[in-house]
């Protein structure tokens, strides 16, 4: 029997990475390198899942320019199905990286996703209704979140993306089966003080109805909270191995979905996927395969078994 499909709904854009050779100087021209690649949280997740042979369906907005055509062609070549609303021009994401590959700041131009309307989703209602799960990113407009949560009773996995966009998820937390946030996004959604511990933020989000909370902690690893409690595991990749941090969160979410489909440990697979992405110049590693993921998981399990923190029971 063929596996049910994962439907990803979100942004596709062109990434422009500008990495300084040395410490960034504000209000000045910094020598460095500029790299252009395909990106977008939804697109990145769709490509990761396609490279892992899950054959996702990707619903998005694309321009009829060369960038839009190449985004569609690449995903379809990897085994994904792409259905897009046509828009005027391709979205852009510009990130400034320091010499170590850490993102210092970024500008995201995703306003064109507003073209994803009820008529488009009604056209694809059969695909949505038969999906094993939906993966949505917070680039989507509030009207999209409202329509999906009201008309498609399927498990929803959500990526908060940024502090600015995380607030869009607040009215829909009780509809979310899996939520991926970092510490800043968690604080924006939990209602707890920013200085509260990660565990406090996870508890608060669970109490608001989220079934599974995945809180990423950068080099400190990640937490998974659910009704059984909260578990913390460290990340495998050393800081010296990091090439580009952009895409690590999208890879984490992809690992969670892969683990869900194969009845594996979501936290371990999320961290393993992040570890692979951190070594890639692009947001998605061109070397990603199920075999590489499983090999990385084995390394990650050894690392986590020696360093992991036991579960904390729910209050």
Image (cartoon, rainbow, N blue to C red):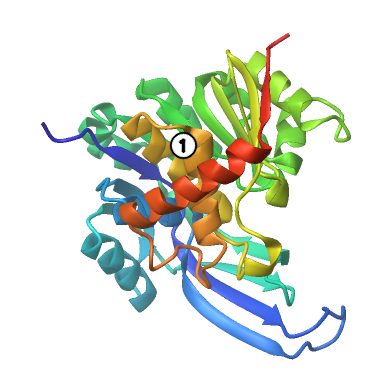
Q: In this rendering, does residue 85 appear at all?
A: no
Q: In this rendering, does residue 246 appear at all?
A: yes
x and y, in percent, of residue 219 in the image: 70, 52
User: For the N terminus, which image quadrant?
Assistant: top left
x and y, in percent, of residue 127 in the image: 23, 35
- Which residue is drawn at the image coordinates 55% and 55% (left, top)? 275
User: In the rendered picture of this protein, how many numbered marks are placed on residues?
Assistant: 1
Q: Nearer the viewer, residue 309 or 82?
A: 309
Is residue 225 rendered to the left or right of residue 119? right
x and y, in percent, of residue 291 in the image: 32, 54
Q: Is residue 93 above or below residue 301?
A: below
- Which residue is drawn at the image coordinates 29% and 67% (left, top)? 74
- Which residue is drawn at the image coordinates 51% and 78% (left, top)? 36
Is residue 37 rendered to the left or right of residue 2? right
Element carrying mark 1 = helix
Q: Is residue 172 above or below residue 245?
A: above
Disc 1: which residue: 144
**Which residue is outermost to the left?**
1
Q: Is residue 140 above or below residue 309?
A: below
Q: Is residue 296 above or below residue 210?
A: below
- Which residue is drawn at the image coordinates 69% and 88% (left, top)? 32
User: For the C terminus, which image quadrant?
Assistant: top right
x and y, in percent, of residue 78 in the image: 25, 61
Q: Residues within 10 Å of mark 1 (few under 14, many from 20)?
A: many
Picture quadrant where residue 189 is located:
top right
Is residue 249 rendered to the left or right of residue 13? right
Q: Nearer the viewer, residue 249 or 160?
A: 249
Picture quadrant where residue 163 is located:
top right
């Amino acid at each position: 029997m063929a596996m049910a499909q994962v439907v990803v709904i979100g942004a596709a854009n062109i990434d422009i990475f500008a990495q300084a050779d040395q410490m960034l100087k504000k209000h000045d021209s910094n020598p460095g390198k500029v790299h252009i690649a395909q990106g977008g949280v939804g697109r990145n997740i769709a490509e990761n899942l396609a490279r892992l042979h899950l054959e996702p369906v990707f619903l998005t907005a694309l321009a009829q320019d060369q960038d839009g055509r190449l985004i569609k062609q690449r995903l379809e070549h990897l085994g994904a199905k792409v259905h897009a609303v046509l828009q005027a021009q391709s979205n852009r994401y510009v990130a400034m990286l320091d010499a170590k590959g850490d993102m210092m700041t970024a500008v995201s131009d995703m306003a064109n996703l507003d073209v994803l309307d009820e008529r488009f989703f009604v056209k694809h209602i059969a695909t949505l209704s038969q999906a094993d799960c939906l993966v949505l990113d917070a680039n989507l407009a509030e009207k999209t979140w409202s329509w999906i949560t009201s008309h498609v009773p399927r498990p929803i996995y959500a990526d908060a993306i940024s502090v600015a966009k995380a607030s869009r998820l607040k009215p829909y937390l009780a509809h979310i089966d899996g939520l991926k946030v970092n510490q800043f996004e968690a604080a924006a959604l939990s209602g707890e003080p920013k200085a509260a511990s990660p565990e406090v933020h996870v508890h608060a989000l669970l109490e608001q109805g989220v079934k599974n909370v995945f809180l990423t902690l950068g080099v400190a690893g990640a937490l998974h909270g659910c009704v059984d409690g909260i578990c913390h595991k460290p990340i495998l990749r050393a800081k010296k191995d990091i090439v580009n941090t952009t895409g690590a969160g999208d890879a984490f979410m992809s690992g969670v979905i892969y683990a869900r489909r194969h009845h594996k440990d979501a936290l371990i697979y999320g961290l393993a996927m992040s570890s692979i992405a951190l070594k890639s110049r692009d947001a998605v590693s061109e070397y990603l395969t199920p075999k590489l993921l499983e090999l990385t998981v084995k390394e990650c399990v050894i690392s986590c078994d020696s360093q992991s923190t036991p579960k904390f029971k729910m209050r």
